[in-house]
Amino acid sequence: MLRRIAIATAYIISVVVSSSFAAELQVGKACPVTYQNEPTGILVFSKAWYHSSRSSAKYIAGDNATGIGIEIHLQNNYSGKVEGLNLPSCDRYRLIQVRETTARLFQGESRIQIDIPDGFDNPFYDNAPLEHGYGLHRTPIDDSDKPWTGRPYRDASVSIYDTPYVSDAWGVEGEHIDVNFETCAVCERDRGYDSILSCGSWGYRRDYMGGMTGWSEPEFSGVSCSATPSKTFQETLDRSHRVDYSYWINWR
């Protein structure tokens, strides 16, 4: 219990320090990250915001909003390094997302898949050109789909910035648009198997309204925490043909 209190206290201090540099991180939910039932950090999900196809971002959804935005930060020891609370003996911390959607798909996409573009050689979201950062870093250059201006500082072992959206043209007539994600912290090891640590699930829905309206503005589903990845997450990694990275071969 004392260790958990210390972790939470250290995280609050980190947020205060980071906010002294620029725009404050709006925390939505913090999920405990554990390894063999021992706490090793926190997976922090920011307060979600809304945007219209990556513009006009704000924390209150407008009538023309088509998607949401969220920051996700893995706070291991609150300095962006693997020392300190590195109980799993990781060489680095990474983040993986699996996405499930009811929207129409681009060619080559699947309804449930690892949330990365074609051409990636590993499943991690924290890879260019996707928006991410390590340690003490500035937020992404593109602030057109963010509810702030400029590049405020953030401090975490690894961070990602996701702004998914589905425009009306990609909705299926008569059906709600549901987009759901499961984001998991990963302990990457240069020698030995990687480990999936803890996860958080989140997403949004655009209700089908019919007529000239089409679909409503998105509604954020909130974040639910899990100590282990779901069966769907594990099967998606294992069966994926997008990257040569099998769950049972590379993970333990």
Image (cartoon, grey):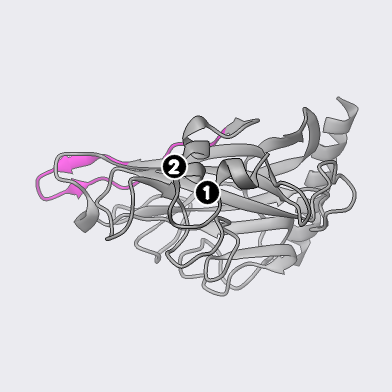
Q: Which mark is residue 97?
A: 1
Secondary structure at numbered mark 2? strand
Residue 79 position, x and y percent, is 83, 57
Residue 203 position, x and y percent, is 44, 42
Left or right, 64 with reference to 222: left
Left or right, 27 with reference to 88: left
Relative vertical location of residue 244 with respect to residue 214 in this rendering, above or below:
below
Q: Is residue 212 magenta?
A: yes
Q: Residue at x 84, y 32 (%)?
A: 5
Where residue 157 sits, quadrant-wise, is bottom right
Residue 106 position, x and y percent, is 28, 59
Residue placed under numbered mark 2 in the picture: 203
Q: Residue furthest front?
A: 249
- Please provide the residue range marked out in magenta: 206-224
The residue closer to the viewer here, 57 or 138, is: 138
Other-residue count near label 1 (Cα within 10 Å), few / some / many at <14 / 14–19 / ≥20:
many
Quarter containing the C terminus: top right
Q: Residue at x 73, y 41 (%)?
A: 42
Relative vertical location of residue 51 with respect to residue 101 in this rendering, above or below:
below
Where residue 223 sits, quadrant-wise, is top right
Q: Amino acid at mark 1?
A: Gln
Q: Residue furthest left?
A: 211
